[in-house]
Amino acid sequence: MAKAVTPKDQRALVDRLMSACGGSYSPERRRKHFISGPQWAAAYQGQALFHAPTREPVSAGEVIRHFAEIGIGYWTTHDTDVISTEDLMTDRQAEIVDEIKKSLRQHGVRCSMVTCETFFHPVWAAGPAAEAPEVRAYAAARVENVVEIGHELGAQFLVYWPGTLGYLLQGAIDEAQTLRWYADAINAACERDIVLAGRKRQKSRNGKRAGTLRHCLEAKPFEPQAEIILPTTDAMLAFINSGLLKHPDMVGVNPEYLHELMWGSAPRAALARALVAGKLWHFDVNDGYRLKHDVDIGVGLVNPLDWVNVLMLLRSHGYKGPFNFDYKPPRTTSNYGVFKVSFPSAVDRFITLWEIAGEALADPVIEEATEALKAGGGDASSRDPAAIFAANKELLTLHELIAHRLVEILLGAHRGRTFH
Ligand code: GLT
Ligand code: MN
Ligand code: MN
């Protein structure tokens, strides 16, 4: 039997094996990417319906300090990750926001996004667009308040994951009415933003335009309701253009990689649909499995090849928005491991996948094959299908050749790495 590793030696072992993994980037290098780390991801204690917590609570100050050390340049949060529901919209909120501002400044980290929790507290039992007008008035106040916090912390983005917008029991609610009511909340947030941005503009003496924030809708196909009214990013795009929003130009999407995979979609195609609509503003980065629950695994641990493809798409279409690491360190990772293994390794896998995507985009084999496919093999004016197919027949083999080459690039085989 192997010798027991006593608790006092365990961290040293983790550290030694982590450095033996190699492949890590410097904090400066990591900071070059627009990577954001959520407070709720770093502070997640491992709890779930069938799981008690395995980790101790972690304060925002600690998370920000660790992010700075690792080289994660941006921090994101829910309102209630840092301010208890009772303290929201009180003087205590202002004090907490001030403390956060101080630790962000002290550690050179910026807040890029704030999101409103509309799913956890019992007030949301019937969703943020419930029948009772007081719930909806409270929802509007909460999103308006998040807009204020966003402006205070200098964020550029707001995210709304509607959470419980749906039902367990069919027939109890009117879906069309619920959508109208949910739109009221988003409209309230945009209107508050317009007022605050206007005030800021008046204040800035040099007349520099202080803009409104980018309001991004996030969908998830299942959880925490049995039936979800806005289950996919495509549904969100339709909602933005439904005529229900007063300021559709201020509203875009925050797709999450896994949420698209969960309903069986190709995340890359879902992202492309948001890209061509000009609405891909924010992106939640993680990994997981098709048609399963929201496991929120660290990027690249399940689908590295698909991730290379996703990043090729985003790189070649000039996506400049944030990559928000919305994953959950597994329950088996300790508090120490969250900042020593989980976050740095996720960031480093992301950067490596980003570089691999860049290499694939510049690869001469892929480039030549792609150009040849686009050039086609025959006369473009032909209306003879058999002749068109015959003219392209040998070229089409290049699809499989490209797929092979991408895997070679992922595995390093294109650099002559072979296995014996
Ligand atoms: C919740 C959800 C995430 C969302 C968060 C933003 S809340 O953790 O599972 O995917 O991005 O509200
Ligand atoms: Mn998410
Ligand atoms: Mn998720």
Image: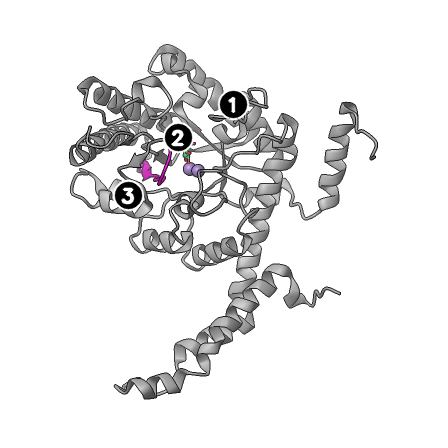
Q: Residue at x 69, y 68 (%)?
A: 416
Query: Can you say which quadrant of the picture contains the N terminus?
Result: top right
Please tell me how crowded label 3 is: few (under 14), some (14-19), or many (20+) other residues with Cα within 10 Å.
Answer: many
Q: Nearer the viewer, mark 2 or mark 3?
A: 3
Instruction: Identify which amino acid the numbered label 2 is placed on.
Output: Val
Q: Tell me the residue that label 3 is attached to.
A: 236
Residue 417 visible to an observer of this rendering: yes
Q: Nearer the viewer, residue 384 or 274?
A: 384
> Does the residue at mark 1 contact the one at mark 2 (Cβ under 8 Å)?
no
Image side of residue 413 versus residue 387, left or right:
right
Dot 1 or dot 2: first in sequence order is 1
Can you tell which quarter of the image residue 203 is in? top left
Q: Secondary structure at mark 2?
A: strand
> Does the residue at mark 1 contact the one at mark 3 (Cβ under 8 Å)?
no
Rendered view: 122 above or below 392: above
Q: Tell me the residue that label 1 is attached to.
A: 60
- From the top left corner, tell me how far across and down residue 342 is, in percent: 60, 36
Looking at the image, in which quadrant does ligand 2 appear?
Answer: top left
Please tell me how crowded label 2 is: few (under 14), some (14-19), or many (20+) other residues with Cα within 10 Å.
Answer: many
Image side of residue 303 versus residue 191, left or right:
right
Magenta stretch, main secondary structure class: loop
Q: Tell me the residue that label 2 is attached to.
A: 114
Say how many tags the image has.
3
Q: Residue at x 57, y 63 (%)?
A: 407
Dot 1 or dot 3: first in sequence order is 1
Residue segment shown in magenta: 208-223
